[in-house]
Image (cartoon, rainbow, N blue to C red):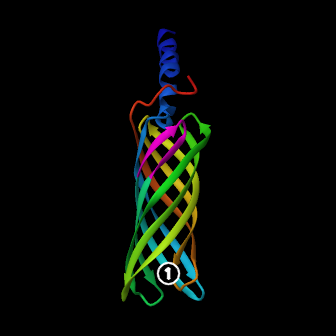
Amino acid sequence: MKKLFLIGVCNLVLLPAVFAQTQKGNWLVGGNAGFTSQKQDDFKTTTITFNPNAGYFVMDDLAIGANVQLSSIKDDDDDAVTTVALGPFVRYYFVDIGPKAKLFANGSFGFGSIKYNESQSFTQWDISAGPAFFLNPHTALEVVVGYGSQKFKDFEAANSFGLRIGFQIHLGSGGSSSSE
C-alpha cells in the first residue's frame, strides 16, 4: 500500500512537469525530415527534406523561431538539385491528447535559393499540424502533415503535400505553468 501511495504522489508531482516543456521562457530545438512528391504542370519532382529549427516560447504553448530547410530534389529526368531556405516559424500546441502528447499547428515562411544551371531565389510558405509524443520531459517525437508552396520568379507556384517525422528538444525551466 505504501508503494502504491508513493507512486501516486510521484505521479501528481511529476506529471505537471511533463507539460512544462511548452511553458513561456523555454526553448525548442530540433528538426524533422520528410519526403514530398510535387507536381507543377506536367512535371513531377521528388524531394527529401531536412528542417532544423530553434524557437522560444513567448507564452505558454506558443513558440516563435527560425528554421532552415535543406532539400534534395530529383525530377522526372533524374536531375538532382539542392535548395536552402531560411525563415521564421510560429508553433502553437493547442490540445492535450493524453498524458504525454499534444497536438500542434505550425506555420512558416522562408526565402531560399536553388542552383540549377543558374542560381534562382524563391519564397515559400508552409502550414502543418500533428501530434508531439513526449518520450520524456524534454524530448518529443513528432509526426507532421504539411502543405506548402514555393514561388520562383517567372514560374507558377509549386504546391506540395507531405509527411515529416522528427524530434524536438525542450530546454529551460520556463516560468510558472498555467496548469499549476
Residue 68 point in image, percent of width and height = 40, 61
* Residue picked out by circle 1: 45
Say whether residue 152 is left or right of residue 118: right
Report crowding for label 1: few under 14, some 14 to 19, many 20 or more residues within 10 A (C-alpha): some
Q: Residue furthest top?
A: 2
Quadrant of the drawing holding the C terminus: top right
Relative to 169, residue 179 above or below? above
Q: Amino acid at mark 1?
A: Thr
Say whether residue 79 is left or right of residue 57: left
Residue at 48% in and 9% down: 2
Residue 55 point in image, percent of width and height = 43, 47
Range covered by the magenta-colored residues: 54-65
Residue at 48% in and 77% down: 46
Relative to 29, residue 61 above or below? above
- Magenta span: chief secondary structure: strand
Residue at 44% in and 31% down: 174
Residue 61 included in the magenta stretch of the image: yes
- Which picture quadrant has residue 138? top left
Question: Closer to the camera, 86 or 69?
Answer: 86
Report the number of discs.
1
